[in-house]
Image (cartoon, rainbow, N blue to C red):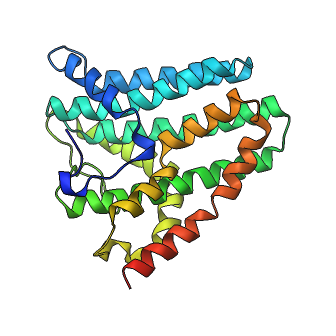
């Protein structure tokens, strides 16, 4: 089940795991396994990838990073096929992602003996990239009646949906706000008028999808496997400059 109507679907470079995610979801549809269980699986996969980085086992790292991306998509797919959307799952997913992203880059810094400052700067850039992509994607989903568990502006604790407790939603929303609030505010201030966009064409969203977490993890896995671990942190620092390019393009096509 897609997050967008067919006519507004685009080639998403960060979503290469979606076919397998749908396969997993269909096979779990009539089981007692919940989307939260699948989220826990992708957290475990992410931690295994980190252990592999620290042990210089980069082929295994790439495998578990890709598996993490597939499972990251599968939890949402399972929620859709079971018709059990939840804010608990949405925020747990995001909180887990940002923590794993930080630990992955710290692990790469450790094995490359680079600069911790640069590693943190790369993490900051990585998160801003992902935030811009998600910002545009959520605008598109809300505009065309797609998946709406994510809100364009995450302000105010949402009301718990059926099957989840308000206490869990409150706690996870506060954690999400603490971890993502700065990134959300920066992107919103850089392009606050995006919410009024009449045009977010498919080709543009395909280009911005290179900022998606799945594609970011694929780049990390590839660079590790080909022996360029020392270039991962500088790459993501430099790649962040495209944030301003994509915002400028978005403004131009809506001018």
Identify the residue at image location x=24%, y=39%.
Answer: 86
Visible residue check, residue 178: no
* Horizontal arrangement in the rendering, residue 20 relative to residue 235 (left or right): left
Visible residue check, residue 58: yes
The image shows a total of numbered marks equal to 0
Residue 221 x/y as whole percent: 62, 31
Q: Nearer the viewer, residue 100 or 14?
A: 14
Residue 13: quarter of image:
top left
Identify the residue at image location x=70%, y=49%.
Answer: 235
Residue 219 x/y as whole percent: 60, 39
Residue 63: quarter of image:
top right
Residue 170 x/y as whole percent: 33, 44
Identify the residue at image location x=19%, y=35%.
Answer: 80
- 89 relative to 188, above or below: above
Quarter of the figure with the N terminus: top left
Residue 189 x/y as whole percent: 49, 74
Quarter of the figure with the C terminus: bottom left
Residue 195: quarter of image:
bottom left
Identify the residue at image location x=25%, y=52%.
Answer: 158
Q: Nearer the viewer, residue 84 or 199?
A: 199
- 3 relative to 16, above or below: below
């Amino acid at each position: 089940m897609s997050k967008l109507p067919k006519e507004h679907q685009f080639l998403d470079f960060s979503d290469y795991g979606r076919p397998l995610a749908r396969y997993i979801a269909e096979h779990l549809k009539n089981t007692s396994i919940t989307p939260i269980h699948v989220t826990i699986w992708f957290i475990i996969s992410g931690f295994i990838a980190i252990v592999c980085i620290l042990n210089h086992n980069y082929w295994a790292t790439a495998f578990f990073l890709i598996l993490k991306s597939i499972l990251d998509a599968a939890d949402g797919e399972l929620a859709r096929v079971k018709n059990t959307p939840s804010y608990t799952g949405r925020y747990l997913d995001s909180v887990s992602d940002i923590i794993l992203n930080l630990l992955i880059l710290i692990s790469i810094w450790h094995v490359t003996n680079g600069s911790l400052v640069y590693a943190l700067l790369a993490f900051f850039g990585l998160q801003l990239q992902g935030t811009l992509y998600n910002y545009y994607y959520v605008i598109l989903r809300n505009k065309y009646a797609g998946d709406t568990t994510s809100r364009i502006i995450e302000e105010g604790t949402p009301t718990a949906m059926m099957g989840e407790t308000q206490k869990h939603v409150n706690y996870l929303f506060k954690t999400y706000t603490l971890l993502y609030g700065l990134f959300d505010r920066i992107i919103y201030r850089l392009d606050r008028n995006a919410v009024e966009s009449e045009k977010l064409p498919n080709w543009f969203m395909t280009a911005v999808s290179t900022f998606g977490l799945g594609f970011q993890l694929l780049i990390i896995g590839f660079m590790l496997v080909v022996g360029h671990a020392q270039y991962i942190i500088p790459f993501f620092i430099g790649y962040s400059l495209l944030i301003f390019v994509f915002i400028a393009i978005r403004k131009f096509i809506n001018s």
